Image (cartoon, rainbow, N blue to C red):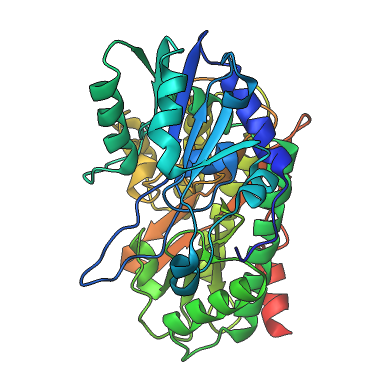
Amino acid sequence: MRYHKLSSSIFIENRKKFTSHLKPNALAIFTSNDMYPTSADAHLPFKQHSDILYLSGADQEESILVLFPDAHKESLREVLFLKETNDLIAVWEGAKYSKDEAFEMSGIKTVFWLSDFERVFNEMAVNAERIYINGNEHLRAHVETEMRHDRMNKWLKENYPGHEYERSQPILHRIRGTKSEHELEVMRIAADVTTKGYKRVLKFLKPGVWEYELEAEFMHEFLTNRSRGFAYTPIIAAGNNANVLHYIENNDQCKSGDLILFDVGAEYGNYTCDVTRCFPINGKFTDRQKEVYNAVLRVHEGAIAMLRPGTMLDAFHKEVGALMTKELLGLGLITAEDVANEDPAWPAYKKYFMHGTSHYLGLDVHDYGLWTIPVEEGMVFTVEPGIYIPEEGLGIRIEDDIVITKEGHENLTRAIPKTVEEIEAFMAN
């Protein structure tokens, strides 16, 4: 792995949190993601399933984790199954985890090769009353591909039809939304790497450069800081491209007088950072750009101030909508009549700010977390209001990563220039 080895205490703590929610005499099973083929004999780069990562740190294909906290045999309470390495695999792909390396990584003492899975799992399953299966129950999920955990769930129900079945996802959504201090340490590294990338790109930004050249500058900085690269497909949108919310082509030239929107974050140790900034390509905001930018910034800072323990997310988003309504009225983009006649399901401000303000952040960019409980210490959210005016070729979004603390918040990405004055001063130097 490229990143520094993470402490096994992260995964030991995560497993304790998860198993504390299991019903009596239950086991839970988690699988790796597939290696996805493209064509001929090619595959996409492997990306591990975040659930098995969260609970074990196993960053390798074909891994299986089984947790059975009430097992009579202590050795079968936590079991990790791994692909056995051999000389051929070592030559062509590089060696896989040894059993000692797997223990050092995960803190799991019992490690078997996959060839032993059915035998060992049967011994566990016949002594369990119920099995927790895993799936993808994220609010934004839209999955058409059958995944490895889907095939595992079918196999379990065919071979163990008499067991009761439960879902792991409700537990994971509850516990993964709140990060441990160990996890936050890794997220701070991802934020630091991202900050270095932004500062590098700001020095490179000028009229005439291409969006993809700026993408390359980010990647250079991320890789040299032990990141595997982008936490998500980067958005580098000059001029009117910023009004396409998920613009990922990154193939236009930057023109003097335009703004450029960067929605870019680094991944470190599989934990993600998610940041958006808008910069003037020639180093100076026009009066109109400054006016709209500062309106977004006021909403951004106001939203951050609202995020504290006890806040309900639905109410939070409504309050941010009220802030944005006020700013859009001040900019003359909407009228009092528009607000008075608005559809409550799609308020007037949505014409210029059509996406949400915040989402959970962690191993996934849109991470697990419940929207039905109060915000609590240790949760991490993005805060990302924006104003998009296609008729003016102007799209502005400002996004930071916010950790909820006992007294308020910690901004992981505040060191990236954000105010008009900070941005112009940095670019002038």
Q: Which residue lies furthest to the bottom in this view?
A: 208
Query: Where in the figure is residue 104, as x and y percent of width and height?
Result: 70, 47
Q: Quadrant of residue 284?
A: bottom right
* Residue 145 left/right relative to 300: left
Residue farthest along the right direction in this orientation: 407
Q: Which of 382 and 285 is in front in this view?
A: 382
Residue 139's spot in the image, x, y percent?
36, 33
Vertical order, 169 against 64 (above or below):
above
- Regarding residue 57, the answer to whether it shows in the image is yes
Could you tell me which residue is drawn at 64 percent across and 42 percent down? 106
Nearer the observer, 156 or 378: 156
Work out whether 169 lies above or below 271: above
182 vs 18, left or right, is right
Res 160 quadrant in image: top left
Quadrant assignment for the C terminus: bottom right
Q: Which residue sits at x=57%, y=44%?
A: 362
**Numbered-mark total:** 0
Give x and y (percent) for residue 155: 27, 30
Q: In this view, does 422 lie to the left or right of 26?
A: right
Place of residue 423 in the rendered image (x, y in percent of width and height, measured from the top left): 66, 71
Q: In this view, does 237 lie above or below 190?
A: below
**Height in image: 207 above or below 227?**
below
Q: Can residue 358 be seen in this view?
A: no
What quarter of the picture does the N terminus occupy? bottom right
| Closer to the camera in the image, 166 or 122 | 122
